[in-house]
Image (tube, grey):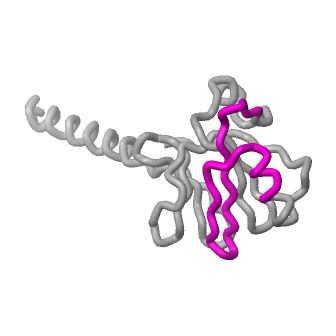
């Protein structure tokens, strides 16, 4: 003869199971993109791409609209990625406007140039030996 199951212990076990599964899904770590020399691109508190050092200190708070890596150089544009780049992930090269600001991070020295105009950005990249035809793309970072 089987003992009768009461409703409360079953309900409590079921609630514990849902709480455990729910907390696992909520604590999924954010994605991180490894960059040269111990730098990382990861989402900030506002779920926008930012660049941090291995130590966790923020180097470029973002938002980063687009970027590329060439050897030890991380280069890109500041601002929110366009809605079109979100629809097609990072398949479309970034096209900035007249007010777009750019950045260059030399990860071998830690030197960051930010708030650059497009012409100053291209001059800085040329001085570092980056190819002139390099395209930048929206980051794919999920939180």
Residue 66: percent from left, percent from top: 68, 42
- Compared across the picture, whether 97 is left or right of 54 comes to right
Residue 106 in the magenta stretch? The answer is yes
**x and y percentages locating residue 58 in the rendered image:** 47, 61
Q: Position of residue 42 (x, y in %)?
A: 53, 52
Does 102 appear in magenta? yes
Residue 78 position by quadrant: top right
Answer with left or right where residue 6 lies relative to residue 93. left
Q: Nearer the viewer, residue 112 or 20?
A: 112
Magenta range: 95-124
Is 109 placed above or below 10 here?
A: below
Residue at figure coordinates x 60%, y 44% from the top left: 64
Q: How many marks?
A: 0
- What residue is at 86 percent from the left and 49 percent from the top? 134
Taking 98 as reference, is 20 above or below it? Answer: below
User: Which residue shows up at 28% across the image and 37% down it?
Assistant: 18
The image position of residue 28, as x and y in percent, is 43, 48
The quarter of the displayed image where residue 88 is located? top right
In terms of image quadrants, where is residue 1?
top left
Q: Residue furthest bottom?
A: 109
**Residue in the picture at 66% in, 75% down:** 109
Instruction: Please tell me which residue lies in front, 38 or 62.
Output: 62
């Amino acid at each position: 003869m089987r003992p009768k199951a009461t409703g409360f212990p079953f309900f409590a076990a079921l609630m514990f199971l849902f709480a455990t599964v729910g907390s696992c899904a909520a604590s999924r770590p954010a994605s991180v993109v490894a960059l040269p020399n111990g730098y990382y691109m990861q989402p900030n508190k506002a779920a926008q791409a930012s660049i941090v050092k291995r130590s966790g200190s923020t180097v470029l708070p973002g938002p980063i609209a687009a970027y590329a890596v060439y050897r030890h150089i991380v280069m890109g544009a500041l601002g929110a990625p366009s809605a079109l780049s979100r629809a097609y992930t990072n398949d479309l090269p970034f096209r900035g406007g007249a007010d777009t600001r750019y950045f260059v991070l030399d990860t071998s020295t830690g030197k960051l140039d930010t708030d650059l105009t497009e012409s100053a950005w291209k001059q800085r990249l040329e001085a570092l030996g980056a190819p002139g035809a390099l395209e930048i793309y929206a980051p794919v970072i999920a939180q």
